[in-house]
Amino acid sequence: MGSFFIVAAVAIFLLIQSIVLIKQGHVGVGTRCGRYHRMLPPGINLKWPLFDNVFSKISIQHRSIELEFQAISLDQANVNFKSLILFAARDEEEYTLKKIAFRFIDEKSFMQTLIRSIEGSIRSFVATKKQAEILTLRQDIVHAVTAHLEESLNHWGFHLLDLQINDISFDEAIMRSMSQVVSSNNMKMAAENEAQAQYIIKTRAAEAEAKAIRVKAEAEKDAINLKGEGNALFREKIAGGLASAGNIMSAGGVDPSFMLYTMWLDTMKNVATHSHGNIISFDGSMEGFDKNLRQMQMVNKILPEQNHNH
């Protein structure tokens, strides 16, 4: 009876040892007597106890690593990085899975090598750039590191899905200095914009003033021309009226000199009416009247003779 229980226990133990459970999203790498034998798909698999072994269980799902590290720029500034790498097995082919399983001694060694490779690539790039350039070169850093990292991961059986640099920062003193530089540049730009705005305003005002002066000058020129034309027309009408009146007076036997004398009297009257404190005196006696009338008659005779000579 005791032997039966021993045999049964050994049989159960060997049965348990012959069953291997592989979770979904993983592939088992089986060895026999320490040598690669076959791949074990997800689910329940059978193996020979004592001879077969599961060397490793490889995940074929997407894997991610978040890193935080520091690099030094060309001008000796400390730059802090936070990055995220997303990768997965290149495919589910046996050759690829064997490389993943046997390239590194264990998972810890692989992760350590991957992290050091990412940090080394970023540090090598940053070491050639100055602090002021780093923030504007985020995409350049990603491209440079991606090219190097894809080659390494492909050699190890993996495929790079994404590399992100989520944060780039500097030491507190440098951040304060950069903030002051940005503030100064903003103030400079604001001052330049204000000066440009003032220049535009003054230029527009000067142009408007010049235009107004030109318009005013043209208006005055037109007004002078119109006034001259009006005065000329007025004088022409007066001359025509005087000539007509003179002809009528001559036809009636009246000396035209009386018309000139009357106009002279009206002129003196108008000057006296609109003067402001000035005194105009003339001889109003009969002798004065006779003298002025003879002068008018002499003018009336001289003008026709001059016109006839011309």
Image: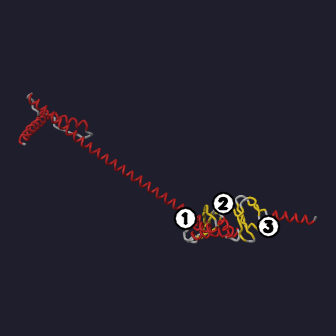
Query: Label 2, on which residue?
Result: 62
Q: Looking at the image, which residue is at 17% across and 37% down?
A: 236
Mark earlier in primary sequence (3, 1): 3
Most extreme residue toward the right is 1
Query: Does the residue at mark 3 contact the one at mark 1 (Cβ under 8 Å)?
Result: no
308 vs 161, nearest the viewer: 161
Mark 1 or 2: the one toward you? 2
* Rendering quarter of residue 121: bottom right
Number of the label disc, if any, that sits on residue 140: 1
For the residues labelled 2 and 3, the Cα–Cα distance comes to 32 Å
Mark earlier in primary sequence (1, 2): 2
Mark 3 or 1: the one toward you? 3
Query: Label 3, on which residue?
Result: 49
Q: Looking at the image, which residue is at 25% across and 37% down?
A: 274
Residue 288 in picture, x, y percent from top left: 13, 36
Asked if residue 107 is positioned above or below residue 218 in the image, the reply reads: below
51 vs 252, nearest the viewer: 51
Residue 266 in picture, x, y percent from top left: 19, 34
Mark earlier in primary sequence (2, 3): 3
| Crowd band around label 3 with a 10 angstrom C-alpha radius: few (<14), some (14–19), many (20+) | some
- Residue 91 appears anywhere in the view: yes
| Crowd band around label 1 with a 10 angstrom C-alpha radius: few (<14), some (14–19), many (20+) | few
Asked if residue 274 is positioned above or below residue 208 in the image, the reply reads: above
Q: Looking at the image, which residue is at 22% across and 42% down?
A: 228
Disc 2 secondary structure class: loop
Task: Tell me the quadrant of the picture where the N terminus can be found.
Answer: bottom right
| Crowd band around label 2 with a 10 angstrom C-alpha radius: few (<14), some (14–19), many (20+) | few
For the residues labelled 3 and 1, the Cα–Cα distance comes to 54 Å
- Which amino acid type is shown beneath numbered disc 1? Asp
